[in-house]
Image (tube, grey):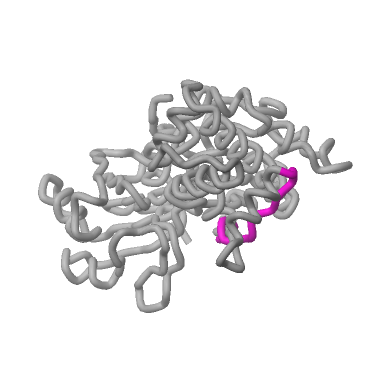
Amino acid sequence: MTAVAPPLQSTRPALAPRPFFAADVGGTHVRVGLIQAGSGLGPAVEVLSYRKYRNADYPGLGAILADFASSQPPVCECVIATAGYALPDGTVISANLPWPLSSNRIREDLGFDAVHLVNDFEAVAHAAAHINGSQVLQLTGPAEAPRGPTLVVGPGTGLGAAVWIPVGNRSVVLATEAGQASLAASTELEMAVLQQMLRGRSHVSIEHGALSGPGLLNLYTALCAVRGVAPTHATPDAVSAAACDGSDPLAVETLELFCGILGSTTGDMALLYGVQGGIYLAGGILPKISQFLLNSTFVERFLNKGPMGKALQSIPVKLVEHGQLGVIGAASWYLEKSAT
C-alpha cells in the first residue's frame, strides 16, 4: 500500500502556530516533517516537507533533526512522537531506540524554544481515527462503526497500542504499554512455544515473544526448538519473506502463529478497552504480510472470545500503512494541545 497523508479533522487554534517540526521516532526509522496548520476546508495538517531516516546512520535524534533543519526554514518548536515512557526530566525510557533520547538536550543543541514529547501510538491514534475508507484494507466487521473508542495496534520494532476516545468535539488518547503484558497461549503449539521461551526467564511479554520484529524472530527460534530443527533464518524479514513465498514450512508455521496470536491479542484489547469505533492495525510489519494476514486465522482468533465474539463482529478491523501517520498524528496532537 502507498503511504499517504490522511485528511485529519482536528480543532484548530484561533491563531494557528507557525510552521514546526514533527518527528515520528521508531526503533528502525525516524520520519520528520515540516508542518503547518491547515486552513479553510482542507486537511487540518499540511505537510510542507518530509523525509525518512535510518536510525543506524546517525548517532542520535539530534543529528537527524539537525540534518533535516539544514534544508528547511527556521522553526521554533518541535514535537516528537516516540515509543517508550517520558520522564519529567525530558529523557525517554525505551527498549527499542538505538540511542538515548532527551527532549531537553535536543532543545538546547538545536535552539528550539520548546520540544514536546508524545507517545508514538498516541500520535498514530490521533491520525488513524480520521483515515478514510480508501486508505485501508478491511479485515473483518462492518465498513463503518459508531463514533466511539478506537484502538490502534502496531507491531514493528516493538508493539504499540493506543486508544482514541472522542469527547464532544475533541478527543482523549490513552497511551498504553500493552506490549509489555504477558504473552498468552491459546493452542497446544503456542503453549509448547511459550514454555520454550520461559526457559531461563520468568516473564515473556507479548512484544518480546511474538508481536514485533524481534518477537517474530524469537517465535521462529522457539518453534524450531520445539520441532527439533536448527534455525536457518537470522532476521525477521527473512522469516516473513520465506513464509510469504512459501519456501520454508517452518517460516510459514511461524507466521501463522504470529497472525493467530495477533488476532487473539487484538480481540483481548478490544474487550479490555471497550472499543466500539473500530480497530486499526498499523506498524512496520503488517503491510509487508497483508495477503498472508488476510488468509490467516487472524479473524477467527479475533472473534474467538466465547459469547463476546458476537460483540466483536460489530467492530471494523482495518489494516493501514504506517507511513506518515506518526508525523501527522504528532502534529495533530500538538495542534489540538495548542488549542486548549
Query: Is residue 176 visible in the rendered structure shown here?
Result: no
Q: Position of residue 155 (x, y in %)?
A: 50, 45
Question: What's the magenta region?
Answer: 177-188
Q: State the residue at coordinates (57%, 67%).
A: 201
Q: Residue farthest to the right?
A: 307
> In front: 214, or 278?
214
> In front: 134, or 284?
284
Q: Position of residue 287 (x, y in %)?
A: 47, 31
In the figure, is residue 17 to the left or right of 275?
A: left
In the figure, is residue 235 to the left or right of 169?
A: left
Q: How many dots with numbers?
A: 0
Q: Residue farthest to the front?
A: 228
Q: Position of residue 62 (x, y in %)?
A: 21, 61
Quarter occupied by the N terminus: top left
Confirm whether the magenta stretch covers residue 252.
no
In the figure, is residue 15 to the left or right of 110?
A: right
Q: State the residue at coordinates (53%, 37%).
A: 130
Q: State the residue at coordinates (33%, 39%).
A: 46
Query: Is residue 205 visible in the rendered structure shown here?
Result: yes
Q: Main secondary structure of the magenta part?
A: loop
Q: Is residue 242 above or below residue 86?
A: above
Q: Residue farthest to the left?
A: 70
Name the quadrant containing residue 43. Answer: top left
